Amino acid sequence: MKRINTGIEGIDEFTNGFPEGRTLLITGDAGSGKTILGLQFAYTCCLQNLKTAYITTEEDAEDLYIQSEAFNWDIKDCTDKGMLKFVELAKIRAEVTEAEVKIEIDSMKGNFAKLLEIIPEDTEALIIDNIGSYTAKLTPYDFRSRLDLLVYELKKRNITALIILDSATSYEFNEIALYSVYGAIKLMKRENPYTGRRERVMDVVKMRSTKTPTQFLTYEIGPTGIEINSAINLK
Ligand SMILES: Nc1ncnc2c1ncn2[C@@H]1O[C@H](COP(=O)(O)OP(=O)(O)OP(=O)(O)O)[C@@H](O)[C@H]1O
Ligand SMILES: [Mg+2]
């Protein structure tokens, strides 16, 4: 299976990159670094010459450019070269008429596979940040089956995807989203029992056909984005 670098060094080390055409789910608390991880993945995909689309439901592209600058990721160059395209659903939701992509938002509600209609035909890598914005009033059963359908369609189009889901919505559906996807990573903060300090940790919940660490990996948001500090022990 061809693998795509995620841009997170520690993860690329033990996975050799994420399998092409598969979906990775990122869940996490507010401020845990989901968007930064999404941008890091988008940028890394562009560096690998993959046509990348970033669907943003909460922030507009301008904020994402600003965030990327903090890490010296030249996202603007990627969009200028046509490697990266932002689809700004937040803007559309705010009823900005000059929105780049015009879609009927109500028809989108919960109908995740429709998201694929608004990205370029030739998309090879996709980030959806945050799919939790489109789950209103869904039953857990509907949520699961619609997410399954999206993952299936992505695989059919051979799109390597990173789907972000806020942990509030993930818990609302009893974390069933974790079952639909090929790989899943949870981002959280916890208190270190030894130091008493709070730290950022990630749990690599699963990654099919890949040996994954069972311990929490501590990470920081540093000058190069998400940086894993833990030594990774796969024994
Ligand atoms: N340049 C930076 N250097 C270090 N840390 C940063 C930097 N920029 C942002 N952060 C930290 O990252 C956090 C936000 O990360 P991010 O926006 O990726 O979180 P998120 O999980 O997407 O949050 P939300 O649930 O609100 O969408 C900030 O709250 C801040 O603590
Ligand atoms: Mg975010």
Image (tube, rainbow, N blue to C red):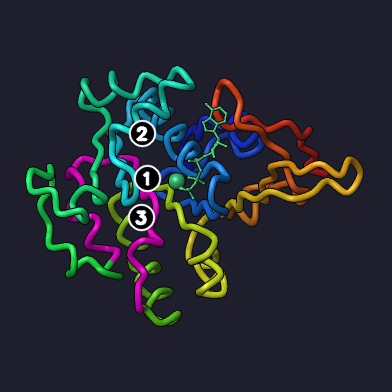
Residue at x 45% of width, y 17% of height: 72
Per the image, label 2 sits on a secondary structure element best described as: helix
Residue bearing mark 1: 127
Q: Nearer the viewer, residue 125 or 190?
A: 190
Q: Pick whichever of labels 2 and 3 is earlier in the sequence.
A: 2
Indicate yes or no whether the magenta region holds residue 150. Answer: no
Closer mark to the observer between disc 2 and disc 1:
2
Q: Pick whichever of labels 3 and 1 is earlier in the sequence.
A: 1
Q: Quadrant of residue 13?
A: top right
Q: Is residue 124 left or right of residue 200?
A: left
Question: In this picture, which residue range is highlighted in magenta?
Answer: 112-137
**CA separation, marks 3 and 1?**
14 Å
Residue at x 46% of width, y 32% of height: 40
Q: Is residue 63 above or below residue 126?
A: above
Closer mark to the observer between disc 2 and disc 3:
2
Indicate yes or no whether the magenta region holds residue 122. Answer: yes
Mark 3 surroundings: few (<14), some (14-19) or many (≥20) residues within 10 A: some
